[in-house]
């Protein structure tokens, strides 16, 4: 069987029901980069028991901007869970940003948190601890093994819906209900 060779940057991955890895079971993951070296993304529907207000206190930053304090911090994936990653719109100009496209960035430098705290910019953010990563060919093999369903990303799902609605909203774009996904996959 041919491995999937398409670029999944700016796509969602939906974990299929038989996903054995507990880090990814029932997750919606946003892919920020996918190339021949591998893939990188953040899980966008798994809030931690921590708010941005608490995170800002822990990293000794002020959070004066309105509307951010109660936002949840997310489990972004099992890699570097001690580091923060900010998925944001617009991309802005930060020290360490992976530009997904002209609209979306994934930033790991402290300056984006400082800007959120003082100016409330960028306005649309998802802050995670950790990220998800795949080595060269690993994601393609997992796709061939039917571990994931891929969907073009829709940022209104991430920035406009509560975390518990994001997975079903992404599936709805394909006309699929979560209960319709079978635990057993087949090949035509």
Image: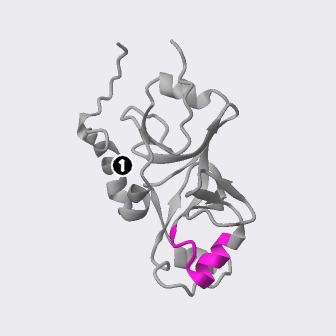
- Residue at screen point 39% across, 34% down: 16
Camera sees residue 58: no
- What x and y, as percent, mark residue 179? 24, 39
Q: Residue furthest right?
A: 95
Q: Quadrant of the C terminus?
A: top left
Q: Image check: 129 left or right of 159? A: right
- Relative to the observer, which residue lies in front, 54 or 154? 154
- Residue at screen point 31% across, 39% down: 174
Task: Point out the stretch of residues depicted in magenta.
Answer: 112-124
- Residue at screen point 32% across, 29% down: 183
Q: Image check: 185 left or right of 58? A: left
- Residue at screen point 54% across, 29% down: 6
Number of callouts in the render? 1
What kind of colouring is applied to the model shown?
A: one colour
Q: Image check: 99 left or right of 21? A: right
Q: Residue furthest front?
A: 102
Camera sees residue 188: yes
Above or below for 19 versus 144: below
Q: Secondary structure at mark 1?
A: helix
- What x and y, as percent, mark residue 116? 59, 77
- Where residue 7 sits, quadrant-wise, is top right
Above or below for 14 versus 115: above
- What x and y, as percent, mark residue 143? 49, 27
Mark 1 is surrounded, within 10 Å at the Cα level, by few (under 14), some (14 to 19) or many (20 or more) other residues, namely many
Residue 114 falls inside the magenta stretch: yes
- Name the residue carrying label 1: 167
Residue 96 falls inside the magenta stretch: no
């Amino acid at each position: 069987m041919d491995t999937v060779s398409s670029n999944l940057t700016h796509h969602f991955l939906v974990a299929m029901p038989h996903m054995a890895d507990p880090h990814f079971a029932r997750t919606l993951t946003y892919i920020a980069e996918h190339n021949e070296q591998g893939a990188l993304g953040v899980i966008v529907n798994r809030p931690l028991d921590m708010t941005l207000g608490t995170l800002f206190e822990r990293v000794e930053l002020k959070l004066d901007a309105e509307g951010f304090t109660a936002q949840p911090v997310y489990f972004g994936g099992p890699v570097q869970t001690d580091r923060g990653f900010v998925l944001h719109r617009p991309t802005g100009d930060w020290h360490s940003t992976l530009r997904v496209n002209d609209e979306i960035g994934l930033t790991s430098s402290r300056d984006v948190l400082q800007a959120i705290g003082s100016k409330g910019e960028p306005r649309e953010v998802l802050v995670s601890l950790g990220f998800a990563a795949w080595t060269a060919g690993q994601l393609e093999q997992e796709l061939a093994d039917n571990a994931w369903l891929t969907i073009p990303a829709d940022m209104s799902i991430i920035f406009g819906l509560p975390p518990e609605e994001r997975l079903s909203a992404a599936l709805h774009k394909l006309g699929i209900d979560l209960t319709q996904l079978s635990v057993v996959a087949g090949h035509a």
